[in-house]
Image: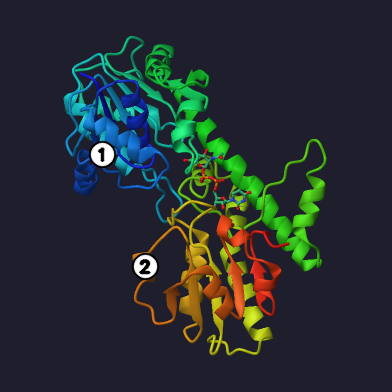
């Protein structure tokens, strides 16, 4: 029956592209009719290098078609979002809906793979949900020889490099039984050139959360260092550069906060699973989440030093970068976007010039504000009293000290040292 990929976003769609490149035929499923229509027309509703050609080719060859309905298939791959709710508790509602759409299609013999980053125990939970929905079938949480096999294979591709890493990264495949893991691994062996590492489902879930928490904790360490050095009147970038010359030290870069939909979310799943124990992980999250407010404070102090009013009267602020990290166009969950948004709101009499070379219009949430416009880099810098560097995009690195002369410069990424 082929393969069905449920959720055609930043993970599901590249996975479709990777599988169709091996000549496999598959059905993509998404709840969003616009996404489905775009894909069926050979277009990609997201921006990721080399993804558009791959999808266009797959659709043209008849290997990929999309629908809002989950079809019958022999392999189901779930790649839907797992956000958190207001209190940082994981929200499994998209996984639950995907499970409900698969349940009526099952006849026995299928493999269901969860790729979405999930709290420990989620794959087991899917098995329990399916058993409730299909009491006529046997599932691996209670049978050694089940009718349906279930595994977790967490995605670990880096936005901006997805079409490279989806093939080359090692993959962890965790089954509810060893046979489940082996059956799921067969799918990945068709396109992954990295190693396939087999384990149990809950360990695979925890391994993925651990990867992103490791990065979050390390970024928090860099951000805390930045605040310590600032208080002590030191250059954090120089301190890190020198400390990193030790053979076993590798400190990450301080910045205006941690964005994206993974690193700022996944550590909370560990905190939710073991709130008493996950003290360092929680503190790291809080440290990184507090960064945007610290940056806003620096801007207001700079304005005060320039003798501007508390509402920003007479001041022009150039905000360089809106994306969540360098050299991509993704503005979702971006600290740079949040800081720009807050400055324009909190300083209604200031002029805020936002510069983002990777977009042509401001995102909807920032449109229609009298004091905020999208500008081009050299003009914005020329006009500005305060130049606030938020993203280390390549074009910003080309600005010279001459361009910045006479400006209050706040460089959150340390590119103009
Ligand atoms: N950041 C810093 N300082 C640094 C590194 C990053 O402030 O030294 C900031 C970035 O500016 C950005 C945020 O952290 O706002 C996250 O960026 P990132 O490049 O570290 O990671 P993501 O979110 O693009 O992708 C991560 C990756 N995980 C790891 O590197 C462990 C990727 O491999 C995962 O697949 C992805 O999360 C995911 O989907 O889980």
Figure quadrant of the N terminus: top left
The total of numbered circles placed on residues is 2
Q: Horizontal and vertical percent for residue 341?
A: 46, 70
Q: Horizontal and vertical percent for residue 233?
A: 81, 68
Q: Please name whichever residue, 106 or 351, is drawn nearer the observer in this view of the structure.
A: 351
Q: CA distance from mark 2 to mark 1?
A: 29 Å
Residue 261 visible in the snapshot = yes
- Label 2 CA crowd tier, 10 Å (few <14, some 14–19, many 20+): few
In the image, residue 388 sits, relative to residue 330, either above or below, namely below
In the image, residue 371 sits, relative to residue 140, either above or below, namely below
Where's ligand 1: which quadrant?
Answer: top right
- Label 1 CA crowd tier, 10 Å (few <14, some 14–19, many 20+): few
Q: Please name whichever residue, 359 or 297, is drawn nearer the observer in this view of the structure.
A: 359
Query: Residue drawn at (52%, 75%), measured in percent from left and top?
Result: 379
Q: Horizontal and vertical percent for residue 196?
A: 49, 19
Q: Is residue 388 left or right of residue 182?
A: right
- The residue pinned by badge 1 equals 97
Query: Residue drawn at (59%, 46%), measured in percent from left and top?
Result: 216
Q: Please name whichever residue, 109 or 417, is drawn nearer the observer in this view of the structure.
A: 417
Q: Please name whichever residue, 193 or 99, is drawn nearer the observer in this view of the structure.
A: 193
Residue 318 visible in the snapshot = no
- The residue pinned by badge 2 equals 365
Figure quadrant of the C terminus: bottom right
């Amino acid at each position: 029956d082929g393969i069905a990929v449920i959720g055609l976003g930043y993970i599901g769609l590249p996975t479709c592209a990777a599988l169709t490149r091996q000549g496999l035929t598959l059905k993509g499923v998404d709840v969003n009719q616009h996404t489905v229509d775009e894909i069926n027309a050979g277009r990609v509703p997201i921006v990721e290098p080399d993804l558009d050609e791959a999808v266009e080719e797959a659709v043209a060859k008849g290997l990929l078609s999309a629908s809002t309905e989950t079809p019958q298939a022999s392999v189901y791959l779930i790649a839907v979002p797992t956000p958190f709710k207001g209190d940082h508790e994981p929200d499994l509602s998209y996984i639950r809906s995907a499970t409900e759409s698969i349940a009526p299609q099952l006849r026995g013999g299928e493999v269901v793979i969860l790729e979405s980053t999930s709290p420990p125990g989620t794959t087991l939970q899917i098995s329990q949900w399916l058993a409730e929905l299909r009491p006529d079938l046997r599932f691996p949480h209670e049978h050694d020889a089940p009718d349906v096999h279930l595994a977790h294979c967490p995605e670990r591709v880096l936005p901006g490099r997805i079409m490279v890493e989806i093939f080359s990264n090692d993959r962890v495949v965790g089954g509810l039984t060893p046979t489940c893991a082996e059956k799921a691994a067969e799918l990945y062996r068709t396109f992954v050139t990295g190693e396939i590492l087999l384990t149990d489902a809950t360990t695979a879930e925890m391994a993925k959360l651990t990867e992103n928490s490791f990065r979050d904790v390390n970024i928090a360490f860099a951000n805390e260092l930045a605040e310590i050095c600032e208080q002590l009147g030191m250059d954090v970038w120089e301190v890190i550069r020198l400390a990193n010359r030790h053979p076993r030290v590798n400190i990450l870069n301080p910045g205006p906060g941690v964005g994206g939909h993974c690193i700022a979310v996944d550590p909370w799943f560990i905190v939710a699973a073991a709130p008493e124990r996950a003290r360092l992980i929680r503190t790291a999250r809080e440290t990184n989440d507090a960064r945007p407010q610290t940056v806003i404070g620096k801007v207001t102090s700079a304005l005060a030093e320039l003798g501007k009013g508390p509402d920003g009267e007479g001041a022009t602020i150039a905000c360089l970068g809106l994306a969540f990290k360098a050299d991509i166009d993704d503005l979702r969950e971006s600290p740079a976007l949040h800081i720009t948004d807050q400055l324009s709101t909190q300083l209604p009499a200031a002029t805020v010039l936002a510069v983002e070379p990777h977009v042509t219009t401001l995102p909807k949430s920032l449109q229609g504000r009298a004091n905020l416009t999208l500008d081009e880099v050299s003009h914005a810098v020329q006009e500005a009293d305060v130049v606030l560097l938020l993203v280390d995009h390549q074009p910003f690195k080309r600005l010279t000290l001459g361009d910045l002369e006479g400006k209050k410069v706040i460089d959150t990424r340390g590119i103009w040292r």
